[in-house]
Amino acid sequence: MKFANLPFLSKLSVVSATVILAAGPVRGAPLDAVRWADVPLGQPGQPDGLTADAKGNIYAASFTLTSNFQPPFNNNIYVWNPNGQLLSTTPLPSQAVPLGNVAVGNTFYQLDVWNGDVLEYNLPLTNLSTPTHTYHICGGFASLFSGQGKFCGLNAIEIISDGKLLISDNGASNFGQNQGNIYYLDRANSTSGIFFSNSALDPLGFPPFGVNGLAFNHDKSALFLANMSTDTIYKLDLTGCAVSCLPGNLSIFAQGGPIDGPDNIDFDDNGLLWVSSGQKDQVVALNAQGSVVQVVGSFGGLSSDGAPIGLLQPSGIVFSQGNIYVGNESNPTLRPLNDPINIWESTSVRGTKYLHDCTDLGCINCGT
C-alpha cells in the first residue's frame, strides 16, 4: 500500500509515461527489464496493482491523490493487449482511489482503498463502463478523516478455489493503524469478514505497511503473502477448499536478502514465485523451497523522455502468457529521506517531471 501522490509503474515489460515491465520465464539466460507500453499522455499515471485476463490483456489502475487527500479524485483503469496496444481507458468514480484488481471470467474487480470497497465491472471495459455492484468491506482511509467506520488498507485481491475473493489489508503504522488482516468477500451473498489475522501480517518496520501481495500456488493449497515492512514472504496452508476454504498453518517461506520491501507477488507456469522487491529496485524469483533462483533488474536512471530505465520501486506484478509484467511505482514515501529518489525529487526539475508525469510499462525479455 502506498499512500502518496508520486508513484509510477514499470515491468519486466514496459509502458511509458508510467512504466510497466515484463519478464519471460526462466530459461537459463539472464533476464532484464525492457519498456513495453505507455499510459496515455495527459492522463493520470502511477498505476499500481496489475492483473491479466484469460486473453492476455493487462490491466492497471492509476493511483493518484489530491493535495489535501480529499475527493474528488481523478483515476483510470487502463487495459493493454498482449502487444502493448492500449485498448481502453475507464474513468473510475471520483470518490475512488484504486489499488489491486483481478479479472474473473467476464467480471473485473477493482479495490478502492479510500472507501474500503470492491468495485465490480462487466468485461470488456470501455470508456463508458461503470461499476455494476459495490461491495463495502470496511471504512478505508476515508474513515481516518471522517471518524466513521473501521479502518482498513485494502491492497491486493485474489480469487480462492471455493469462489470467494481474498483481500489483503496492510494497515498503516504511519497513521497509527498497526494491524494487518486478510478479508474474504463471498460474492454469492455479498457478505465479507476477516478470513485470517496474525501479528505476522502487521506493519512492523519500514515501509509502514504490512501484508501487501497475495498469490496462490498452482493447486490452490496455499496462499502466499508478502509483508512489506518485515521483508518476509509467508505461506498460509489452506484446508477444506472442496467446500469452503479455511486458513491453516502459517510459516515463513522466504525472508531478507534480495527481498527488501516486497510488494505484489505472482507465480509463473514453472512454479516460481516472483516478488517485487521495491526497496532494491529488483524482481526476485523464488523456487518451491523459498530459495532465490533469479534476481532481475536495476535502476539505470532516466530515459530522454523522463521515464525510468529498468526498475524503480517496482510494485504491481503479474504473470501472463510467458511474461512477467511489473509496474514501477517510484514512490518517495516508501524510501528513506536520504534515498536518491527523494533527493532527486526535491532538487531536480528532471526528477520532478519523472516522478509526477512519466510512468511506463515494460517487459523483461518479452517474446524470448
Image: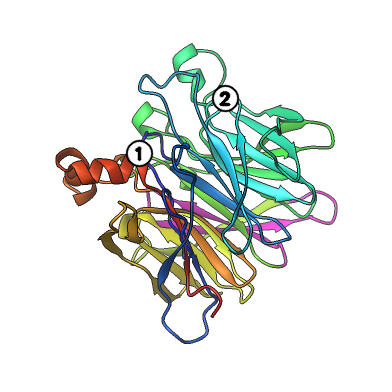
Q: Start and end of the magenta stretch? A: 219-245
| Residue 86 image point, x, y percent | 59, 51
Q: Who's the residue at 37% across and 55% down the image?
A: 278
Q: Where is residue 193 in the image (x, y as percent from the top left)?
A: 68, 33
Name the kind of residue labelled 2 in the image.
Asn
Q: How crowded is mark 2: few (under 14 residues within 10 Å), some or many (20 or more)?
A: many
Element type at mark 2 = loop
Horizontal placement of 182 versus 12: left or right? right
Which label was assigned to residue 6?
1
Residue 82 in percent (x, y) is at: 62, 63
Residue that numbered label 2 is attached to? 115
> Residue at (74%, 46%) from the top-left corner?
124
Q: What residue type is labelled 1?
A: Leu
Magenta span includes 213? no
Number of on-image labels:
2
The colour scheme used here is rainbow
- Estimate how packed mark 1 is, as few (under 14), some (14 to 19) or many (20 or more) residues with alpha carbons within 10 Å: many
Q: Looking at the image, which residue sits at the far bottom?
A: 28
- Of residue 86 and residue 221, the one placed in the foreground of this image is 86
Q: Could you tell me if the residues under marks 1 and 2 are in contact, i.e. CB atoms within 8 Å?
A: no
Q: Nearer the viewer, residue 160 or 289?
A: 160
Q: Which of marks 1 and 2 is nearer the N terminus?
A: 1
Query: What residue appears at the point 52 percent right and 73 percent down from the top-left corner?
Result: 366
Q: Which residue is drawn at 72% across and 35% down?
A: 120
